[in-house]
Image: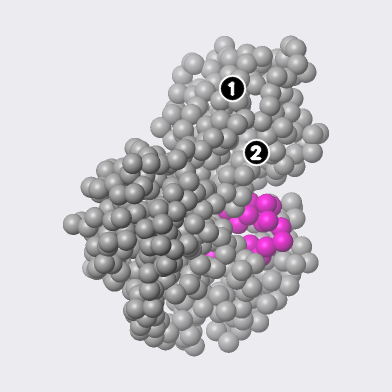
Amino acid sequence: MKGAAVVAEILKREGVTDLPCYPRNSIIEPAAELGIRPYIVRQERTGMHMADAISRVTSRQKIGVFAMQQGPGTENAYGAIAQAYAESVPLLVLPMGHARRAAQIAPNFSAMLQMRGISKQVEQVTFADDIPNAMRRAFTQLRNGRPRPCIVELPVDVLAEEFTGDIDYQPVLTSRSAPDPAVVPRAAAALIDAKRPVIYAGQGIHYGRAWKQLKELAELLAAPVVTTYAGKSSFPENHPLSLGSGGASFSKQAYHFVENADLILGAGCSFTQTPFAINMPRGKRYIHATWDMAEVNKNLPTEMALVGDLDLILDALVAEVKDRLKGKPKDSGPVAKEIKTIRDAWLAEWMPDLTSNEVPISPYRVIWDLLNTLDVPNTIITHDSGSPRNQIAPFWESTEPMSYIGWGKSTQLGYGLGLTMGAKIEKPEKTCVNFWGDAAFGHTGLDFETCVRDSIPILSILVNNHCMAAELNVMTGSTAKYRSTDISGNYSDLAKALGGYSERITNPAEIVAAIKRGVAKTKEGTPVLLEFMTKKETRSSSYGRNGG
């Protein structure tokens, strides 16, 4: 048995069923022979994004895997691995490496040497008999602790080398860690005593599958919940205690409650400060519940830390809070009323945009009609970088866990398409949607053809304003004789040429009918791109220190 076949067999034993990839890589054929379906993408970044979504929408129950060739293939994937590292996504990356005799000779690219800063673990296999050990180490890191990419570089001659003996490999163990039992009572007491507590929930809730515990804790404390972009859909946004999600843009109620909180519980978040996250206020009391001690006190002074898996942390907090309250939740009526009052006023401010009849179409009208036309509980949606993310996140109401793939610590254009493709592969019964702009299409749009070729019937919603609108604000006052933000294209015609179904919509009265036709086509198995001709909108819902 060759080394490549050993890798394929281990992937099979670990439950891998799909392999986004880009030739050449010697493991693709033996994996296909074992029933692992390959998806050959047009560029490495999209394939990596597909694997990313597989890990996310299953809450790490399955690990997304991507395989690519040595040299330029590995180099092209660098940005996508960096994105997954920033967003804490567990991916197994399997680059071929140069033959051992040339692997360390410049300028041959070495994943082991040059990708250490964007991976949880990286190693190069030096002989075929060590493949099971390397794969065991990688999967153990992927399934335990903080999720991030792991890289196993497989030199081309190692994959062709004969493996001796039997494959001594069993699926790796999964272990969880619980918080310090001495801190739990103190944290529970502080939360109960707080006058205006707020829970700031992140992606760790999804990976811990701690949705039920989060809801129970919020209801016990009568504490409103705001989520990060990555944590969006971890708390039902039709719940009276929901403040929606927050990042570069957010709802007015989220800003109001965070600013006026006396104690903030960060649950499954990092509190990382970036231009694309809520800038948490100084001078508050913070309790940080996270799986990674390295995040504690990184950006904000933390009074108490609960370190471990979020389901076990919240289980402990719920039990302690319930015991101290004698099983009687706090009255959430006044808080819910305050949230509703602010939310209603905020929506009233934005309703002219959300229901606008102007031409070109307002992108907010597209979002509003999409929200009110799709079967939201049975939809998985993601956004792209820049304006699409800032526009959709505050207004999209997620009600089911993992129905929204949010992100924003790193913000590569074109990320959303691959995420939607991976989500559709893993959840074929769902309507899977990416909301993106014309700039993002320029980065990864040709992989719409991969959707056609591999029968991945996504619904792609493209808002085309012939402009990189998010950059217009930084161009204010420019005396340049040219517009560096101007772009153009007919993406509907291109989508048709690539073999999909597409429409170009210019009238807001046609939005709903076009969406319904698009959904119907996806149910027939056809990938769909709906191109909406929109105005150059630069406003987003943000307040105070975040601007707006």
Q: SS of the residue at dot 1?
A: helix
Mark 2 highlights which residue? Answer: 22
Residue at 38% of width from left, 62% of height from top? 325
In this picture, is 87 found above or below 158?
A: below
Residue 229 colored magenta?
A: no
Q: Position of residue 338 (x, y in %)?
A: 34, 79
Residue 452: image quadrant is bottom right
Distance between the alpha carbons at the discs numbered 2 and 1: 22 Å
Give the residues drawn in magenta, as a range.
Answer: 419-438
What is the total number of numbered labels drawn onto the structure image? 2
Q: Position of residue 94 (x, y in %)?
A: 60, 31
* Image position of 74 (left or right of 408): right
Q: SS of the residue at dot 2?
A: loop
Residue 220 or 464: which is nearer the viewer?
Answer: 220
Q: Position of residue 444 (x, y in %)?
A: 56, 52
Neighbourhood count class around disc 1 (C-alpha, 10 Å): few under 14, some 14–19, many 20 upward: some
In this picture, is 103 found above or below 417?
A: above
- Looking at the rendered structure, the kind of residue marked 2 is Tyr
Instruction: For residue 375, say whether it is visible.
Output: yes
Mark 1 highlights which residue? Answer: 134
The N terminus: image quadrant: top right
2 and 1 marks in contact (CB < 8 Å): no
The C terminus: image quadrant: bottom left
